[in-house]
Image: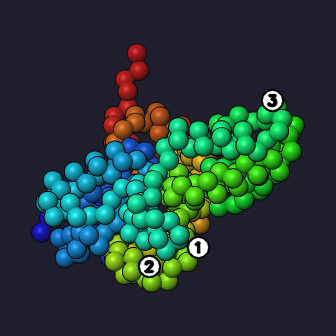
């Protein structure tokens, strides 16, 4: 068996070798969160957990590939059966098997950014009378995407973000509704639909929810602070049976608010999972002490953040 205490610092080792149950790992930049996740996978596999019962959710395909390759180096090729990838990728896997339960063909097409905007532009042409003052297709696409990622109606987004519109908001609603209708008629989904419909499978289809809850014994999430409402709810559902969820993130680094990311997901994790353990990775391997001193001053006393103290491992720079 691997001696993790030799390969990891004490906090990383505590997180990687934690027992069952919910776990929140607060990992500031430069503290080795990827290393911790990789060794967590290795630890679980070494203890007999089947790799295909592990779900590792990331925010980029590159991150998923990197973690999978590093996990293979540690735990062997069997880790290749691990379910890993972005939320969109995992939802696509769900939907390729069960999209027919939602009225889509299982071989549905996926609209890329250009496809989506071309279809929206056509919906504008077919719906709007005065196109001169009407928002451009990219603006409409952004509003539709915002509504999807915030799990609300397009009208709610308009009320919150566009109070100075010079056009009738109902025209935007009509365009958005026509866009939805035409996607359905084409048997197609855009990227946001992958999340929306993946979550629908889990909330509306009891047998499918039970199947995936039973399948995934452990759910691990990277960059948890960047989850939106749909993604956080999906994680909670998938981990709802075995309750083995490991959320790794840094409440100081929420960078995707423009696409619905909500830092409250990480702040409220202990409330949603009241039995969770919290492990803080505070040893920083990237920044010099002077930088960390400033970072600690910014973090200190903020009631909307978890309190942490970043400790340098690099020496202080010599002053001239």
User: Gap in Å between the C-alphas at discs 3 and 2?
Assistant: 47 Å
Q: Which residue is mark 3?
A: 132
Residue at the top extreme, as displayed: 320
Q: Is residue 171 above or below residue 234?
A: above
Q: Earlier in the sequence, mark 1 or mark 3?
A: 3
Q: How many marks?
A: 3
In the picture, the quarter occupied by the C terminus is top left
Residue 301 visible somewhere in the drawing: no
In the picture, the quarter occupied by the N terminus is bottom left
Looking at the image, which residue is at 70% across and 60% down?
152
Secondary structure type for disc 2: helix
Measured from the top left, where is residue 225 in percent x and y? Answer: 52, 55
Dot 2 alpha-carbon crowd within 10 angstroms: few under 14, some 14 to 19, many 20 or more: some
Quadrant location of residue 318?
Answer: top left
Q: Which residue is mark 1?
A: 271
Front in this rendered view, residue 81 or 172: 172
Q: Earlier in the sequence, mark 3 or mark 2?
A: 3
Measured from the top left, where is residue 182 in percent x and y? Answer: 61, 54
Residue 84 visible somewhere in the drawing: yes
Quadrant location of residue 121?
Answer: top right
For residue 90, the mark is: none
Nearer to us of marks 1 and 3 is 3
Taking 262 as reference, is 314 left or right?
left
Looking at the image, which residue is at 20% across and 60% down?
80
Q: Is residue 316 above or below residue 254?
A: above
Dot 3 alpha-carbon crowd within 10 angstroms: few under 14, some 14 to 19, many 20 or more: few
Q: Which residue is mark 2?
A: 208
Measured from the top left, where is residue 164 in percent x and y? Answer: 86, 39
Q: Earlier in the sequence, mark 1 or mark 2?
A: 2
Looking at the image, which residue is at 72% across and 59% down?
153
């Amino acid at each position: 068996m691997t001696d993790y205490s030799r390969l990891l610092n004490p906090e990383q080792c505590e997180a990687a070798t934690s027992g069952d149950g919910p776990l929140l790992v607060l990992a500031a930049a430069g503290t080795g969160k990827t290393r911790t996740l990789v060794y967590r996978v290795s630890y679980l596999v070494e203890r007999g957990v089947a790799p295909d019962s592990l779900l590792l959710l990331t925010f980029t395909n590159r991150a998923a590939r990197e973690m999978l390759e590093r996990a293979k180096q540690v735990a062997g090729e069997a880790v290749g059966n691990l379910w890993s990838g972005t939320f969109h990728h995992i939802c696509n896997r769900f939907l390729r098997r069960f999209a027919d339960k939602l009225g889509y063909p299982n071989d549905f097409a996926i609209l890329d950014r250009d496809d989506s905007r071309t279809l929206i532009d056509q919906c504008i042409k077919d719906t709007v009378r005065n196109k001169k003052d009407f928002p451009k297709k990219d603006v409409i696409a952004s509003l539709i995407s915002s509504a999807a990622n915030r799990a609300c109606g397009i009208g709610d987004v308009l009320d919150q973000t566009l109070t100075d519109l010079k056009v009738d908001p109902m025209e935007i609603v009509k365009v958005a509704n026509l866009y939805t209708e035409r996607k359905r008629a084409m048997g197609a989904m855009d990227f946001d639909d992958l999340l929306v419909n993946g979550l629908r499978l889990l909330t509306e289809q009891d047998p499918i929810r039970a199947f995936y809850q039973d399948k995934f014994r452990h759910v691990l999430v990277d960059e948890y602070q960047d989850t939106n409402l749909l993604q956080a709810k999906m994680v909670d559902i998938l981990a709802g049976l075995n309750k083995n969820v490991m959320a790794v993130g840094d409440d100081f680094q929420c960078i995707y608010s423009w696409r619905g990311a909500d830092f409250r997901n990480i702040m409220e994790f202990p409330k949603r999972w009241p039995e969770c353990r919290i492990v803080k990775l505070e040893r920083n391997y990237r920044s010099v002490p002077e930088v960390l001193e400033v970072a600690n001053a910014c973090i200190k006393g903020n009631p909307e953040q978890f309190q942490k103290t970043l400790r340098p491992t690099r020496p202080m720079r010599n002053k001239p």
